[in-house]
Image (cartoon, helix red, strand yellow):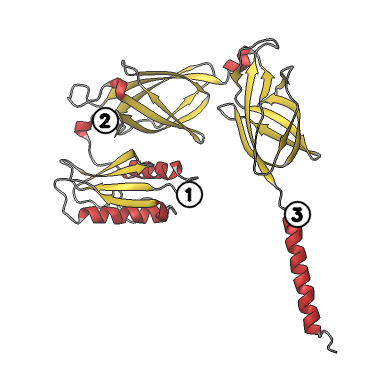
């Protein structure tokens, strides 16, 4: 009859401890589900006219813990939460001003593993509280040379603005005016297009506007006439590509396609040099696997690279004659 050796006992003990650690770790990992909540407000307890309620802090209780959930600029709470039952405790404006729930508000919801729970939250705000979260953006469209031919019709021009993690695409009317009611905050100019084709902002264009509560914020947006395009500068080219990366940051399968067009004065190998420069920049940003390249036809003017996101034209980078990159350092566009 054989007996366990000290080595065997040690191995058995270590194995048992390993299995125990796995079990404890599994218990500690919380199971989670999703909450999709639309938060809306009314001005009177009997009102049937509701508006999405922005930046409302909804306090809930869960397993002896208190959690604050805040609606975004669209009046939505979209979160991953641990499974279990949740009870509404209170609601407030983001400055701490308390709000009452509507009379028929359900006070409990349940999060189930891997499932999405839809749960509406209604609060009562004054009209002043509702209106204080909005201002108005008034933008006037201009071209760098109004008299030259080639300028697109104002009503075909749209601008793309970034607000937090969201993007707004807003068209000008036939008079070249945007008059839009928007949530308060900072809006960054990302890009512009005319009839679906990217156009460039004028050099020196202010790149953001701040919409303030109850005010009209007036800005001018100056677009370069397509007939006078010159090479895209380093900062603008970098911004176009970085914004494209941002667009697909949470989409594992999405790719950015760069289409190279030589200009009429470019040497043949220039297109390959530009491809290598963009590929190096993709690697610097950590998006090497998300960048694909294709050769396009020759331009009659400057050489360019079309930046396509999800199969749609996102931006265009123009190059000086035979230049491999818009920046002095072709391998790292952050270095001047």
> Quick one: label 2 or label 1, which is nearer the N terminus?
2
Q: In which quarter of the image is residue 96?
A: top right
Give the vertical position of 24 relative to 305 (above or below).
Answer: below
How far apart marks 1 and 3 lie (CA) works out to 29 Å
Q: Tell me the quadrant of the picture where the N terminus can be found.
A: bottom right
Q: Position of residue 69 (x, y in %)?
A: 67, 33
> Quick one: label 1 or label 3, which is nearer the N terminus?
3
Which residue is at a point 17% across and 40% down the rendered structure image?
301
Label 2 element class = loop
Alpha-carbon neighbours of circle 2 within 10 Å: few (<14), some, or many (≥20)? some
Q: Which mark is residue 252?
A: 1
Q: Look at mark 3 in the image and give the residue it sits on.
A: 27
Q: Look at mark 2 in the image and give the residue it sits on.
A: 224
The reply to whether residue 329 is visible in this rendering is no
Q: Where is residue 144 in the image (x, y as percent from the top left)?
A: 25, 27
> Quick one: label 3 or label 2, which is nearer the N terminus?
3
């Amino acid at each position: 009859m054989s007996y366990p050796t000290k080595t065997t006992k040690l191995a058995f003990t270590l194995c048992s401890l390993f299995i125990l650690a796995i079990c404890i770790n599994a218990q500690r990992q919380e199971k989670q589900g999703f909450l999709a909540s639309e938060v809306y407000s009314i001005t009177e307890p009997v009102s049937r006219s509701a508006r999405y309620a922005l930046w409302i802090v909804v306090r809930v209780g869960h397993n002896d813990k208190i959690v604050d959930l805040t609606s975004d600029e669209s009046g939505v709470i979209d979160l991953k939460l641990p499974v279990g039952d949740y009870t509404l405790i209170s609601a407030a404006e983001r400055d701490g001003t308390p709000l009452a729930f509507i009379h028929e508000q359900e006070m409990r919801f349940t999060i189930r593993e891997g499932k999405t729970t839809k749960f509406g939250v209604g609060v009562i705000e004054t009209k002043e509280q509702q209106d204080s979260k909005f201002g108005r953006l008034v933008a006037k469209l201009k071209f760098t040379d109004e008299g030259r031919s080639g300028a697109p019709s104002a009503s075909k021009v749209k601008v793309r603005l970034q607000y937090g993690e969201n993007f707004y695409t807003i068209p000008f009317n036939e008079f070249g005016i945007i008059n839009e009611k928007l949530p308060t905050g900072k809006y960054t100019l990302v890009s512009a297009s005319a009839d679906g084709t990217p156009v460039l902002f004028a050099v020196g264009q202010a790149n953001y506007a701040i919409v303030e509560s109850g005010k009209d914020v007036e800005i001018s947006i100056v677009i370069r006439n397509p007939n006078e395009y010159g090479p895209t500068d380093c900062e603008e080219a970098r911004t176009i590509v970085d914004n494209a990366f941002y667009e697909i940051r949470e989409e594992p399968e999405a790719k950015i396609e760069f289409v190279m067009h030589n200009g009429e004065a470019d040497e043949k190998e220039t297109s390959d040099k530009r491809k290598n420069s963009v590929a190096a920049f993709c690697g610097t940003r950590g998006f090497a696997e998300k960048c694909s390249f294709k050769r396009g036809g020759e331009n009659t003017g400057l050489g360019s690279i079309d930046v396509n996101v999800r199969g749609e034209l996102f931006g265009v980078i123009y190059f000086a004659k035979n230049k491999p990159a818009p920046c002095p350092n072709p391998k790292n566009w952050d270095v001047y």
